[in-house]
Image (cartoon, grey):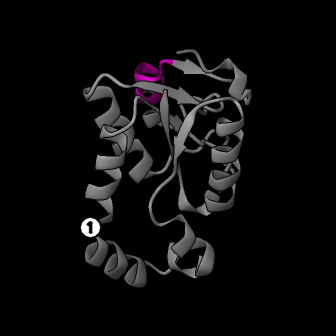
Amino acid sequence: MKIMVIGSMTFAKEMLQTKESLERLGYVADIPFDVEFHLNDERVIDDLEKNFQYCREHDVIWKGFQQVADADAVLVLNLPKNGIPGYIGTSAFMEMGVAHWLRKKIFLLYEPPDQNEYRWAHEAKIMATKVLGGDLAQISV
């Protein structure tokens, strides 16, 4: 099974670690094509003008969708961010939508936040195949 790891680029280091962990479990794993770029310049995440230019020049959204399409499943690396447990950012949420539309398995690493506080958590739960509780061994083929 080929698993595409998605999530906020704030978690670029964790994406690399998760890819390695998945490969040790016997999966083929992929991460966003631009993880190294974000690791080399962490400011690009929060500098929206620089981020906009980079994303437009490199067709980041389309490439992310294509990576999802090329995988059998996605793993959403929904770590806590900005005080939100189980955070899922806009791009990852769009990629989840593509995965759902393409009938891919969608694994959430952690439980999303309370759907009464964050409406998007409701849809995330609807699309998710399984919540792993932080345990990659819970991925099922």
Residue 115, visible in the rendered structure: no
Residue 1 image point, x, y percent? 49, 26
Q: Is residue 59 magenta?
A: no
Residue 114, visible in the rendered structure: yes
Q: According to the image, label 1 marks what residue?
A: 59
Which residue is found at the position 62% from the left and 72% from the top? 39
Within 10 Å of disc 1 (Cα), the crowding (few <14, some 14-19, many 20+) is: few
Task: Indicate left or right for 66 with 82 as reference.
Answer: left
Along the viewing direction, whichever of 71 and 26 lies nearer the viewer: 26
Q: Which quadrant of the view contains residue 123? A: top left
Along the viewing direction, whichever of 41 and 48 lies nearer the viewer: 41
Which residue is found at the position 32% from the left and 82% from the top? 53
Number of numbered discs on residues: 1
Determine the main secondary structure of the stretch shown in magenta.
Answer: helix
Which residue is found at the position 62% from the left and 52% from the top? 15
Residue range in magenta is 123-129
Compared with 140, 68 (above or below) is below
Residue 19 image point, x, y percent? 63, 46
Q: What element carries label 1?
A: loop
Residue 122 image point, x, y percent? 45, 26
Q: Which quadrant of the view contains residue 69? A: top left
Q: The residue under label 1 is which amino acid type?
A: Asp
Task: Indicate left or right for 128 with 69 as reference.
Answer: right
Which residue is found at the position 58% from the left and 81% from the top? 41
Task: Indicate left or right for 59 with 95 as reference.
Answer: left
Compared with 100, 57 (above or below) is below
Residue 66 image point, x, y percent? 29, 48
Compared with 14, 126 (above or below) is above
